[in-house]
């Protein structure tokens, strides 16, 4: 079935379309979510919530504003960030084992292998260093623009502009 038809059926609440899109995108979404929450079970839970939210808000998707994958990826990223900010999540992370911190430390310096869960690593590697830093913090580590601004010691406006320009550059690479 063609993707456009599949998405239209999804918007019309067709369960087969939901199931097909879920199988197409769940692994990618879970990879992105896991990079933010760092817990497999929580990533699965958030990923399922993302698809339910997408199902309920399917009518808000417009192909004129962007690709379906990007739309659902943004829902996943925002849901994962919301989860890490919740009181329940913070409580579960109070008594973490050392493995959690070792994993964070090992992957905090550069884009790690799990970044490639959505197949974008090869494109991100082609970006200039200033773009890599912004993309890594905002999309793969779940930083807010303010947090990225502090981490990179740049004004928030610069972060926003770089983010927009770097995403545009990525989009152009992917479409080539």
Image: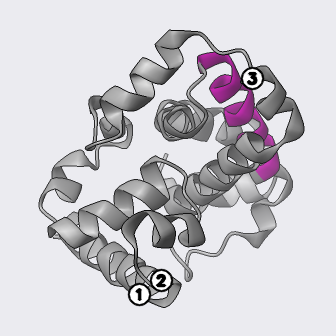
**Vertical placement of residue 47 versus 140, above or below:** above
Q: CB atoms at circles 1 and 3 under 8 Å apart?
A: no
* Residue 94, numbered label: 3
Which quarter of the figure has residue 30?
top right
* Residue 158, numbered label: 1
Q: Is residue 175 visible?
A: no
Looking at marks 1 and 3 on the same chain, the residue that comes earlier in the sequence is marked by: 3
Q: How is the image coloured?
A: one colour
Q: CB atoms at circles 1 and 2 under 8 Å apart?
A: yes
Residue located 48% across and 22% down the image: 101
Residue stretch in magenta: 40-53
Majority secondary structure of magenta residues? helix
Q: Nearer the viewer, residue 102 or 32?
A: 102
The residue tagged 2 is 160
Residue located 16% across and 49% down the image: 122
Tell me: 75 left or right of 38: right
């Amino acid at each position: 079935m063609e993707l456009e038809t599949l998405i239209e059926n999804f918007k019309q609440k067709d369960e087969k379309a939901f199931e097909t899109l879920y199988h197409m995108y769940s692994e990618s979404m879970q990879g992105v979510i896991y990079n933010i929450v760092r817990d497999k079970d929580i990533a699965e839970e958030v990923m399922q919530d993302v698809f339910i939210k997408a199902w309920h808000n399917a009518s808000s998707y417009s192909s004129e504003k962007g690709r379906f994958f990007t739309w659902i990826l943004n829902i996943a990223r925002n849901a994962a960030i919301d989860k890490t900010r919740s009181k329940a999540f913070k409580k579960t992370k109070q008594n973490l084992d050392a493995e959690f911190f070792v994993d964070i430390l090992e992957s905090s310096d550069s884009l790690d292998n799990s970044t490639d869960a959505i197949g974008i690593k090869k494109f991100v590697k082609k970006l200039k260093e200033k773009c890599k830093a912004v993309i890594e913090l905002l999309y793969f580590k779940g930083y807010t623009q303010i947090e990225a601004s502090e981490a990179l010691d740049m004004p928030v406006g610069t972060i926003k502009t770089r983010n927009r320009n770097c995403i545009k550059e990525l989009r152009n690479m992917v479409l080539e």
